[in-house]
Amino acid sequence: MKKKIIVTGGAGFIGSHIADKLLSNNCRVTVVDNLSGGRMEFLEQNTSNPDFEFKNVDLLEPAKLETAIKGADAVFHLAANPDVRLGPENTKVHLEQNIIATYNLLEAMRKNNVRNIFFTSTSTVYGEASVIPTPEDYGPLVPISLYGASKLACEALITSYCHTFKMNSWIFRFANIVGARGTHGIIVDFIEKLRKNPQSLEILGDGRQNKSYIHVSECVDAIMYAWEHSNDMVNIFNIGSNDTITATRIGEIIVEEMGLHDVKFNYTGGTRGWVGDVPKMMLSIDKLRSIGWEFTYNSENSIRDAVRSTLGKLQ
Ligand code: NAD
């Protein structure tokens, strides 16, 4: 009997890759998404597959959500507002789209007796960690963005539901994920700016922000591997590359891949790109390694592949 899996946010960048992978692993997949950030075109390849269905449901509508997830074996919960930069101008968006949405999902799962949840968390739960690479047991967790705070709150809700209602969870704290279908983040931002003005590139901060990036294909494979190789009530794993890359170097790769020359880099100044930005981030991936997983991508080739996909050079 094929497993029935719900993917919230499955029309988004990472969620659509998760949906593809689950279908290729012989699961039935129902994507639940309100298309606020996702696109139906990311799911086009699956629409004629009898094991696939799409439900246009907002996680902030609990009754519809309860109906949408009936009969599922597990939920991959990716629906969220992922924009860290929004916090200072809109203090409610991450509370509603991330915390309340996750609470609604957990309630829908509890009422439907759906016991397994996979959650996409983030490096921002660590805040400005004093230990780099940062391991999963680092603490105290002191997020510096409202987005990071909301994801930490979601993690806390999930782990407490697991203990209270005998559920199981896999929580993945991502570094920056890049690749085909990326719709936001530094690559999209730089490419858009350079298309408008190929002579100069505005880089937020001093360009020395140094962070880890991993390709979406390996992120998805690592999630599937962790699912197969861990079975505690709460399983928390970092996902990222074993190195970092600066914002300036990303700019150089994009300039090269776009075939541009003599582009002037203009820095807005300061050590951070925006309020709530963590300038140095690299996660320890030893826990995943301890169960036998190895990443083959590093930050530079993850970025280069993602740039090529965004420019239409790769599928
Ligand atoms: P994305 O914006 O492409 O995907 C999010 C999806 O959720 C979209 O399809 C959107 O339509 C849907 N959605 C949002 N609010 C919803 C709601 N109320 N009801 C139903 N659907 C809703 O973002 P992404 O980059 O693919 O991120 C996926 C997940 O991974 C998010 O939870 C994000 O916080 C997390 N994450 C992403 C990164 C990254 O580098 N992209 C890093 C760390 C964590």
Image (spheres, grey):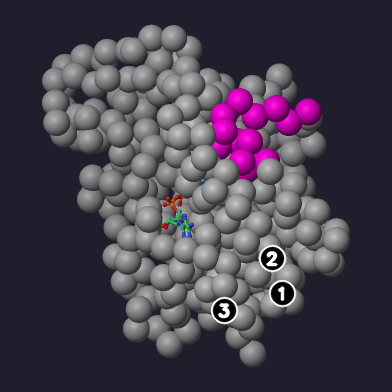
Q: State the SS at label 1.
A: helix
Q: Quadrant of the C terminus?
A: bottom left
Residue on which the image places disc 1: 111
Which residue: 58% across, 60% down? Answer: 77
Residue on which the image places disc 2: 107
Image coords of residue 118 (percent x, y): 65, 60
Question: Quick check: marks 2 and 1 in contact, CB under 8 Å?
Answer: yes
Which residue: 62% across, 56% down? Answer: 102
Part of the protein shown in magenta: 140-152
Which residue: 47% across, 27% down? Answer: 88
Crowd around label 2: few <14 · some 14–19 · many ≥20 (10 Å): some
Left or right of 95 in this view: 251 = left
Residue on which the image places disc 3: 67
- Cα separation, mark 3 vs mark 1, equals 10 Å
Residue type at mark 2 is Glu
Image coords of residue 276 (percent x, y): 53, 24
Residue type at mark 1 is Lys
